[in-house]
Amino acid sequence: MINLTSKTTISLKNLHLSLDLNRYQEFIGQLRKINFELNAGQEMEVKFIVNKRIFYYSSRDFFFMAYDIGNGRLNLARASYPSPLLDRPLTRQDFVNAYNAQYTSQVDDNLAMILYITSESARSAVIADRLIEVLAGRNTINLTDYRDIIYNFHNTARYVGYISANGVAQPNSAPLTKQDYAEYFASGLFSGSSKKAIARLRNL
């Protein structure tokens, strides 16, 4: 069960990435809810009781800021994804291993997986829906297949009105859907090939 020990803290008892489906869905729902109850830029602290791991996020865009895996808080020196992204099918066990891994001050493959099951799932229904299947043991996910989504979240959210011109998420914001991304890719604002991006989106 999720216990909100303060307005800015989400504590999950016995949360492990082999968690049952209902628990993960509850977690994502609570993360989205708390995110929009806070002022823009306010810090969210997500506590995983198992292994006493804590992940820190900035509100309104789920930006990953820092972590504490038992040796004190470490702020990220580089928050961008590794290049290239992991390009192989990932199972539930891969995410369990990533959760239990050691990290650095930069986003490596393990932290990239943590970002997918937290920030990116909260931002995008497309990713959350797939990861629900993965964590339930019914499917796999290749992070590279979702690069158009993760790299165009802010532009798409701004296009559909979920983020204002000055970068602040709006109260009516919702997880982005395939339709949201398709509309942005076809809008003429997308800098890449809209035809290829929409084709890749359809295959997700």
Image (tube, rainbow, N blue to C red):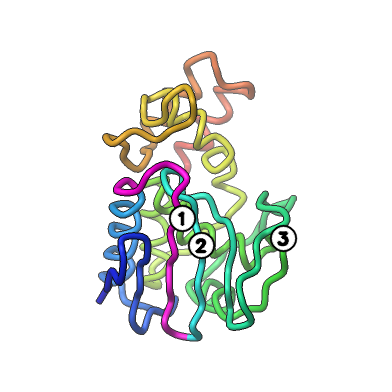
- Tell me the SS state at disc 3: loop
Q: Answer with mark 3 or mark 2, whichever residue precedes in sequence.
A: 2
Q: Name the residue under label 2.
A: 56
Q: Give the crowd class for mark 2: few <14, some 14-19, many >=20 residues within 10 Å.
A: many
Q: Is residue 85 left or right of residue 154?
A: right
Three-letter amino acid code of the residue under disc 1: Glu
Q: Answer with mark 1 or mark 2, whichever residue precedes in sequence.
A: 1
Residue drawn at the location 50% of the way across and 72% of the way down: 54
Q: Eyeballing the image, is 23 above or below 177?
A: below
- Tell me the SS state at disc 1: strand
Viewer-side residue, 100 vs 61: 61
Q: Is residue 98 left or right of residue 170?
A: right
Q: Mark 3 points at which residue?
A: 106
Q: Do the residues labelled 1 and 2 touch (CB within 8 Å)?
A: yes
Three-letter amino acid code of the residue under disc 2: Tyr
Q: Eyeballing the image, is 151 above or below 1?
A: above
Residue drawn at the location 49% of the way across and 25% of the way down: 166
Q: Answer with mark 3 or mark 1, whichever residue precedes in sequence.
A: 1
Q: Name the residue under label 1.
A: 43
Residue drawn at the location 46% of the way across and 61% of the way down: 117
Q: How far apart are marks 1 and 2 (CA)?
A: 7 Å
